[in-house]
Image (spheres, rainbow, N blue to C red):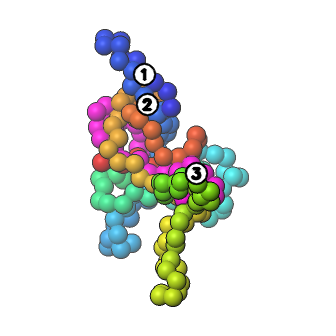
């Protein structure tokens, strides 16, 4: 993340810089042949030896070089195999949604993980950062499934909606999105129209 200054008003806009490199269209799936409509894009060009022989064959069918990542975008599209998708597909002010794997925060308690409030600290209370009761005694004499408890937090796929494209740098394949997006630095994200 960084910030961009408006030269006229002097206003500051927090932005996330995303490298949306040239993504060749590798496969176009249709409901007749595959049962659903989708477009498969490749990203992050690498040396041939860094991908499997099967992936190399799949990319060679489309006439594309070796790429590290393949991502499918569901829905009907006018794209054809061999075409390249660049940042020029977006324009400033356009609303987008960004999906990615959120930053993993490890094993966390209920206060941080589920926004529980803590118990009293005074009068000899031992319920300082504990979850409280998680089930009844005789009936039902068990803890229900799905109870909000301590556990692994983050590291899941999250889609952030309502984001706006602030600027498009076609020369360097950069997309400046207003606000923060899910995922760690150098994490892989999918950007779709909202």
Q: Residue at x 40, y 17 (%)?
A: 5
Which numbered marker is on residue 122? 3
Badge 2 local density, few (<14 within 10 Å), some, or many (20+)? many
Q: Which residues are magenta?
A: 82-111
| Labels 3 & 1 near each other (Cβ < 8 A) | no
Judged from the image, the secondary structure of the residue bearing numbered disc 2 is strand
Q: Please tell me whether residue 78 is drawn above or below residue 5 in the rendered image.
A: below
Is 160 one of the magenta-colored residues? no
The residue depicted at 53 percent of the width and 46 percent of the height is 183
Q: Earlier in the sequence, mark 2 or mark 1?
A: 1
Which residue matches tag 1?
Answer: 4
Tell me the mark number nearer the camera, choosing from 3 and 1. 3
> Can residue 109 be seen from the camera position used here?
no
Q: Which mark is residue 15?
A: 2
Tell me the distance, in whole angstroms, between the alpha carbons under discs 2 and 1.
7 Å
Q: Residue at position x 32%, y 60% from top?
A: 75
Which SS class for mark 3?
A: loop
């Amino acid at each position: 993340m960084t910030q961009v200054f408006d030269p006229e008003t002097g206003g500051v806009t927090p932005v996330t810089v995303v490298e949306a490199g040239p993504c060749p269209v590798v496969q176009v799936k249709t409901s007749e042949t595959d049962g659903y409509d989708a477009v498969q894009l490749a990203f992050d060009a690498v040396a041939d030896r860094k991908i499997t022989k099967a992936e190399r064959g799949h990319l060679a069918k489309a006439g594309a070089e070796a790429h590290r990542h393949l991502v499918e975008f569901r829905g009907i599209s006018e794209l054809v195999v061999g075409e390249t998708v660049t940042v020029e597909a977006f324009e400033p002010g356009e609303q987008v949604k960004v999906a990615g794997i959120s930053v993993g925060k490890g094993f966390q308690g209920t206060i941080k993980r589920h926004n529980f409030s803590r118990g009293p600290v005074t009068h000899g209370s031992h319920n300082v950062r504990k979850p409280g009761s998680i089930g009844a005694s005789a009936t039902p004499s068990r803890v229900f499934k799905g109870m909000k408890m301590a556990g692994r937090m983050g590291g899941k796929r999250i889609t952030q909606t309502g984001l706006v494209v602030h600027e498009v740098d076609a020369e360097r394949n950069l997309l400046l999105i207003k606000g923060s997006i899910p995922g760690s630095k150098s994490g892989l994200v999918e950007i779709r129209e909202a």
